[in-house]
Image (cartoon, rainbow, N blue to C red):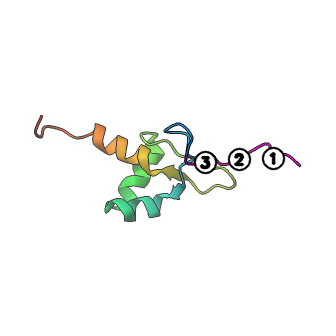
Amino acid sequence: MNTIYQIPSDSCAPGTHPEKLLTIREAADILGVYYWQLQRSVKRGDIPSYTPFNSRKLVKLSEVVAYITSCRHGGVE
């Protein structure tokens, strides 16, 4: 039986690997930020969230990091 859906192999084009979805708390722990700060950003819609199977909101770590990076002010250029 042929499978219709497969996880891409290591030889696929960059960016085609599925990224693991994390809970808001897991993402906050990994990044070392407060849970409530991340949760507030998700509620405002600043950070995209996903609810694939239930009401628990999940985020992609790369999108959270991209949002934090875009909010930086000043620094060395």
Disc 2 + disc 1, Cβ < 8 Å = yes
Kind of residue sitting beneath label 2: Gln
Q: Main secondary structure of the magenta part?
A: loop
- Residue 4 makes an appearance in the image: yes
Kind of residue sitting beneath label 1: Thr
Magenta span of residues: 1-10
- Residue 35 makes an appearance in the image: no
Q: Is-magenta flag for residue 41?
A: no
Q: Disc 2 versus disc 1: distance between alpha carbons? A: 7 Å
Q: Residue furthest left?
A: 76
Residue ID for mark 1 = 3
- Helix, strand or loop at mark 3: loop
Quadrant of the drawing holding the C terminus: top left
Q: Residue furthest front?
A: 11
Q: Please rate how many residues cluster around mark 2, counting C-alpha atoms within 10 Å: few if below 14, some from 14 to 19, many from 20.
A: few
Q: Residue furthest right?
A: 1
Q: Which mark is residue 6?
A: 2
Q: Which mark is residue 9?
A: 3
